[in-house]
Image (cartoon, rainbow, N blue to C red):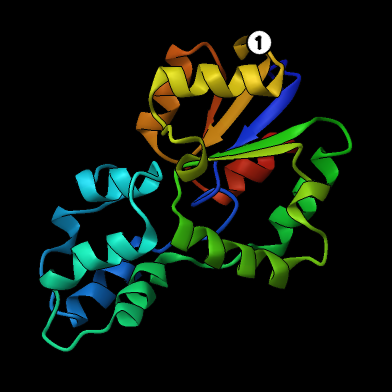
Amino acid sequence: MQLTFKTILFDLGGVLIDIDYLATENAFKKLGVSQFETYYTQFAQNQIFDRFECGEISPQHFVNLLLPNTLAGTTPNQVVGAWNQMIGSFPGQKIELLSQLSKHYPLFMLSNTNALHWVEVQREWQKATPQPTSAYFSQIFLSHQIQMRKPHEETFLWVCEQMGFEPKDVLFIDDSPQHIEGAKQAGLQTFFYQNAADFYGFFS
């Protein structure tokens, strides 16, 4: 490894668990939301999603805000199902890598996620490994629980403080360029995840 770091801070979606934004977009199109991509993508989203990710509105309120945009007769459960379509699985090779890395470094996670997605993520985790997340991660920071999001510099600085590490000693891994930029501004070392091969190669 070319970088010298004391701990690793992982993103979740698109780095550790597979994410398919198009699956959610297509699911909402079937429910009558013709331009879902104008509301939400990997790179930007409107205020409803920001507020939900920061825990400012409840899952029920979030669903109620989306329902009027859907076809008449659409149920709350259908909205939740469409929203969760993007959540994929944890590749076994990534669980194995976490297992190996956790023997050498304290591992942490920082994710912009929401209460509905986190339930689904936990289900997928249990399918991937019998071990709890605490067997791999010293601490997990979720935007809807800490009420802060990436890419804000203050989010990274606060998380590093909670972790007990100086930003310069933290390697942050994420697949969104705006989050990588925010981490750099906060003084963290970064690895921009673009494909699995380079990711595994980095740690080999």
Image quarter of the C terminus: top right
Q: Which residue is mark 1?
A: 166
Above or below, 162 relative to 101: above
Q: Where is residue 156 drawn, in percent x and y?
A: 51, 22
Depth check, front residue: 52 or 196:
52
Q: Where is residue 174 drawn, in percent x and y?
A: 50, 37
Residue type, label 1: Glu
How crowded pointer 1 is (Cα within 10 Å; few <14, some 14-19, many 20+) is rated as some
Disc 1 is placed on an element classified as loop
Depth check, front residue: 184 or 144:
144
The residue lying at 14 percent from left, 54 percent from top is 38
- Judged from this view, the residue extending furthest toward the right is 103
Image quarter of the N terminus: top right
The residue lying at 47 percent from left, 40 percent from top is 143
Above or below, 173 relative to 38: above
Q: Is residue 202 left or right of residue 178?
A: right
Above or below, 44 relative to 177: below
